[in-house]
Amino acid sequence: MTKTVIVTGSSSGIGRDIARAFVERGDNVVLNGRSAEKLTRVATELGAPEQVATVAGDIGAATTGTILVDIAVERFGGVDVLVNNAGIFGAKPFVEVTGQDLDGYLNGNLKGTYFTTQAVVRRLLTQGRGGSIVNIGTALIDHALSGLPASAALVSKGGVHALTTSLAAELAADGIRVNAVAPGIIRTPLFGDGDEPASGRLALLNRIGEVAETTAAVLYLADAAFTTGHILPVDGGFISGRTA
């Protein structure tokens, strides 16, 4: 059965690859990002114009989620899956974090996820056939690094983890499943020119991850009919242990 999937932050990196995978298996996808130009380029690269729609906008604004749902309904008749991928991350010592810094992370990560999910859940409840929400968190919530002071970013992502488990309980009776993927260090534009050997040694599998591995976890959770409230690490064993 063809599904309609909204993927936020899908103009590059993890989100772009998630969108690719859904399109390749025959689903309809609504792409979202801040740059209309980048979204148009990704839509063209995906090579399936009848399956793809684009919405440029900042998910920190509640109206963006509403527009995403409206476009999904207009183009494809409804919505079945939401992947809350859009977000920002950065490091800064705790005592140097400003109110503007904190607001940026809370708006871009937590509020964006919250408001977009609200808009989608309203539609899912109207449709009455359930649905699936997959949030993107981070393995750093469960295992912080002393050399990566990122309290502001992690507070917002921790809220995404909490929202995942809370909504899983609240929405289960309506057949709406809510899960999350918690990536470790993944090769994306955000990783940039980071020290790959040193980063890889933080995981039991002794390497950094690839976007396709995160995508595989998202696809699993999108379809896993008896799984809800689960936060799935995709971290090469970063949380589980250390090499001897």
Image (cartoon, helix red, strand yellow):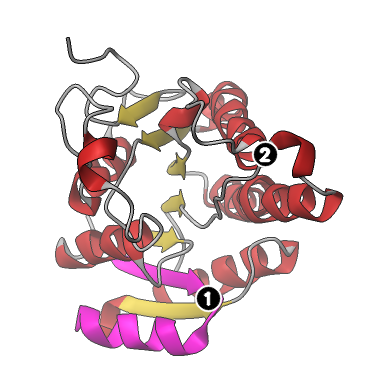
Residue 93's label in the rendered image is 2
The quadrant in which residue 232 appears is: top left
Inter-mark Cα distance, 1 to 2: 41 Å
| Percent position of residue 151, x then y | 65, 34
Where, quadrant-wise, is the N terminus in this rendering?
bottom left
If the image is split into quadrants, where does the C terminus sit?
Answer: top left
Q: At numbered mark 2, what does the secondary structure look like: helix, strand or loop?
A: loop
- Kind of residue sitting beneath label 1: Ile
Q: Where does the image place residue 11, in percent across and percent down from the top left?
A: 40, 72
The residue segment tinted magenta is 27-48
Q: Is residue 212 left or right of residue 218?
A: left
Disc nearer the start of the sequence (1/2): 1
Q: Mark 1 points at which residue?
A: 71
Q: Given the image, on which type of amino acid does mark 2 rest?
A: Pro
Magenta stretch: includes residue 43: yes
Q: In this view, does 10 lie to the left or right of 33?
A: left
